[in-house]
Image (spheres, grey):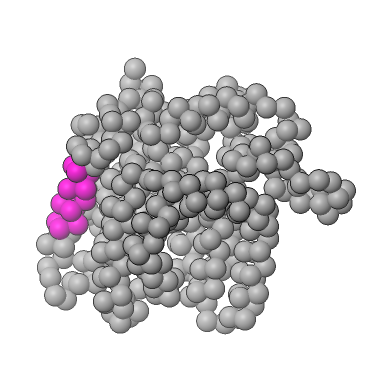
Amino acid sequence: MLAYWFLYALPAIPAFVGVRRPNMFSLPWIAVGLLFILAIGFREQVGGDWDSYLIRYDSLIEAPVDQVLASDPGYRLLNRLYYNLIEAPTDVLFESDPGYRWLNRLMGIWDWQIYGVNTVCGAIFILGLFAYCRQLPAPWLGFAVAVPYLIIVMAMGYTRQSVALGFFLLALADIERGHFLRYILWVALGTTFHKSAVLLVPLGIFTTQRKSWFWRVIAVATAAYGLWDLFLEEHQEDLWKLYYVDQKMESQGARIRVLMNLVPSLLLLLYAKRWKQLFPAYQVWFWLSIAALISVVFVDFATTAVDRVSLYFTPLQVAVFARLPVLLGDRFPPPFLRLGVVMGYAAVLFVWLNYATHAEYWLPYRNILLQ
């Protein structure tokens, strides 16, 4: 348990002190990032899905190449276009994330095992988080907000979706700078690791670019249709009937996770005018906030489905709380706001470690580099 508190303290202390924005190549900034990558990548039997990912790794590295190709959306598309072959069989339903599948095979060839897979996935996630936090007014504060849930729970538990979220954070960093095509590219890469990321494509319409709005809509519609056709179109009915909704799958703690996005969403909507004056891409965060509010309503209807989708709304916590000292700085002292955020997420970490249903799968923290 102390390992997790140590990880939280690394960004929380400079966040509370108010250390100035680190340089991109600042030694402390890079060192903390590398430490988190090692903590994620070389963990041993940590995370609720540890065993299932081991089984997945063994099956992927042992599968014949032609079987792997048969379940690859890109390969299927080529077959349909040029050879008019039959669709991939339904037994590869959950092996249709080519980015993760080929990463496993590559690590198997190099004999880096599951630790190589987790290290690469952790590096992508941390890179995305750092890229977004770097452009916040308080990067250390944004990183501290991410530690209890986004890093400890998600990056060490939901490996594939954490990679998709890492690419989404890269996309958010670019969309706030007005880079529309980069946003689409990052989201497309995220979809190769977890197909649910295709739902994020429409946000590209709200890039900060003011020109070519019509062409952005056309490009977003085209990209969304193409990615949906490759990754989800064949499986949407099965996912709805068999797994997420009709079977009433339950995700423990889903309601709490959804409610965690409620506070930053309300803050952003309440201070919308000031946000527009100070920060970019309000429309993107506005629609993410609306989606987060809707998820609160529907979480009891389809717990697992809403829980999985709402994971993409968690950057709201980083974006809003890291900007709180500036957003509310005219009403409250910034040091007081920084302390409130740091202590608030320390409370989140404490409650999760001590009372969460599945926290036992994270305790004690083990790392093969320490054994």
For image coordinates 28% across by 57% down, the residue present is 260
For image coordinates 28% across by 58% down, the residue present is 259
Image position, residue 246 (x, y; %):
50, 51
Indicate whether residue 342 is drawn in magenta. Answer: yes
For image coordinates 43% across by 75% down, the residue present is 283
Q: Which residues are magenta?
A: 339-351
Indicate whether residue 197 is drawn in magenta. Answer: no
Using the image as rendered, state which of residue 181 and residue 307 is in the foreground.
Answer: 307
Question: Quick one: quadrant of the N terminus?
Answer: top left
Image position, residue 48 (x, y; %):
38, 34
Using the image as rendered, state which of residue 362 and residue 32 is in the foreground.
Answer: 362
Image position, residue 106 (x, y; %):
62, 31
Image position, residue 292 (x, y; %):
37, 64
User: For residue 6, which quarter of the picture?
Assistant: top left
Using the image as rendered, state which of residue 126 and residue 156 is in the foreground.
Answer: 156
Does residue 73 sit above or below 340 in this rendering? above
Question: Quick one: quadrant of the C terminus?
Answer: top left
In the picture, measured across the screen, residue 86 lies left or right of residue 236, that is: right
User: For residue 309, which quarter of the picture?
Assistant: bottom left
